[in-house]
Image (cartoon, grey):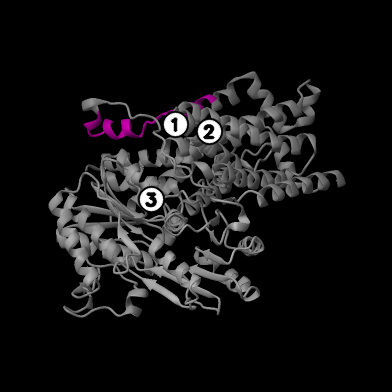
Amino acid sequence: MIRRILSTSIALAAAAVLLSGCDKKEVSKTGGADSAKVGFIYVGPRTDYGYNYAMDQGRLAMEKDMGIKTVYFENIPENAEVERVMERMIGDGIKIIFATSYGYLDPALEVAAKHPDVIFMHGGGFKLAPNLGTFFADIDEVEYLSGMAAGACTKTGKLGFIAAHPIPQTLRNINAFTRGAQSMNPKVSMNVVWTGSWSDPTKEAEAANTLADQGIDVLTMHVDGPITIAQTAEKRGIMVCGYHADASQFAPKGWLTGAAWNWAPLMEKIVKSIQDSTWKSANLRGNIRDGYVKLASFGPAVPDPVKTEIDSVEKAFVAGTPLWIGPIAAQDGSVKAKAGDTLTRAQIESMDFLVKGVIGSVK
Amino acid sequence: MTILELLLGILLSGLRSATPLLQVLLGETITERAGVVNLGVEGQMLSGACAGFAVAAASGNPWAGLLAGVLAGMLLSSVHAFLVLVAGANMFASGVAVWLLGGGLSAFFGIPYVGRRIDGFASPDFGGAAKLPLLGPILRVATPSVLIALSTWVLCSLFLYRTRAGLRLRAVGESAESASTLGISPTKVRWAAILAGGALSGLGGASLSVDLVRNWVEWMTAGRGLVAVGLVIVARWNPWYALPAALLFGVVESLTLRLQALGVTISPYLLSTLPYLVCLGVLVWGSARARSKGGMPRDLAQVFSKTE
């Protein structure tokens, strides 16, 4: 009996030891860790062509443009582990930490309180400390532009959106994309399939196949990584608009375009302000006007006149044309904004409906 | 679209969803029929998915990927076999350790392969046949991993019920003591059964990453290995029932996506619990009818009823 308990606990301890060393990986790109100045923490792998990849592109651009040395840790879970990683970075002499995942906010606040000489920037949060600020961007306008490409290129008039959970962020993206598509082809329908998980490639592939079976010929998504859906669309010979980052290489024929983050200008601005001591703790937000989000490259299936039209709408957004302007009707026909009215910031951030033309559930 | 085409579509997409589950389910059935439970299948599946994708990416050969998945699954299951059969560890604790180990190791070694492209199996050109109403969809779903899973199903069932080795394995699961009086070594048989389970769960994982999804993401199996452990009970430890049990889960899972695509507006939260609810329902219904342990190997039953 004792032998059993012993060997079992040895097994569990071995697993725990192996695991604790498993999820993190440090690479300091140039020089040793001590010469690095800016640290990045990602919740997943930085090569996912998704959220983490987009953040890492900002880091790489910063190294190139500003000659700054950086360190990154990837696959860091949103628990006490991230606090240890932050402490370790600070121990290595890092003075600026980009904590890029939503769940890092509270750990970052705790570590920030202990190290007032280190500046923390958190992605997406809305809490502040004297040495902690947040940054994020609205991607709605780019979703609209991406939807324009889908609406112009669809032959069946049926679009499909694969998303994880019905929350305001996904609903905003679905609605913006659909409105963009409707602006090119008022008759398009949009089918939403919820997978119930931010990362379940099996379901994403099955959802893409199912939508293709229903005659849908343009897919887009709001899940952690666009690769599975882009590849499945390509395999089924249909078109795809991406999310988070340019994943055109996974669908060379069917890629139309996509809504992508462009964190480099924002991250570089933040680090510059820290360098010349003008940094202030704030919730930094931006959008297409600031260039923090952008349209991914166009695929071969998008005709030139469509590109021109998308360009002109993009210019209008940059010039200040609002996206969420009425008439906006929900699925059941109820009026959400009358012609000429715009949704308020609070209404946009708590969006809980799908626009007319979308087939799918919001609850 | 005729009703027949609609039903066929549901069945075929269910088969696609069920394929990795079927492999794992068959493997776990063999392991449990020899009297050992292995909760580590989730980790074995992940290691198979990771190794399979890595080898397919490096070699460009999806067949080599599937083989690597089999080997990775076996390698990890040998940890479970060692802990349970040699070190005498509790099989549930050991299984959980193997599960976490497989998940952690695959996440770590898989990092360089995230975002890599593999080509998977080339879709054969069926010409005009691919456009035929009923045959076309069947040909599209019949990828190598689906066909391998179906053949494994027949082979495993024949092995267990029609061969001497299968008889010995079942004998060990029913009573290791009696089997050893007949000159069968229960330890050897259980080693083989655990390794076979490892091979099939690794193959199931590799089927996912190399063929069905063609992508590697850490923890990508999303609990399907544990679902397979549960489905063993639904299938009453009988490999012939493994296909209907896996199909049941696969069909309901793909149906939840298909219903949404067809425009049925049911809460997605409710829909995503449906596969589990349906399987639970079948389990309760089946147990009520059988009024017994429902085919559980007798030595295994002791693990659940007796405390040492």
- Residue A226, numbered label: 3
Residue A312 on the magenta span: no
Indicate the quadrant where residue A137 lies. bottom left
Residue that mark 1 sits on: B145
Please state which amino acid type lies under the numbered disc 2.
Leu
Q: CA distance from mark 2 to mark 1?
A: 9 Å
3 and 1 marks in contact (CB < 8 Å): no
> What residue range appears in magenta?
B130-155
The chain ID associated with circle 3 is A
Q: Nearer the viewer, residue A76 or A215?
A: A76
Output the chain of dot 1. B
| Disc nearest the viewer among 2 and 3 | 3
Is B135 within the magenta?
Answer: yes
| Closer to the camera in the image, A88 or A93 | A93
Give the class, few, some or many, for how many residues have Cα within 10 Å of label 3's Cα (few <14, many ≥20): many
Q: Are marks 2 and 3 on the same chain?
A: no
Secondary structure of the residue carrying tag 2 is helix
Say if mark 2 contacts mark 3, CB within 8 Å. no
Mark nearer the N terminus (2 vs 1): 1
Q: Is residue A271 above or below residue B245?
A: below
Q: Is residue A185 above or below residue A287?
A: above
Residue B94 falls in image quadrant: top right
Instruction: Identify the residue under disc 2.
Output: B203
Neighbours of disc 1 within 10 Å: few (<14), some (14-19), many (20+): many
Residue plotted at (22% across, 42% down)? B2
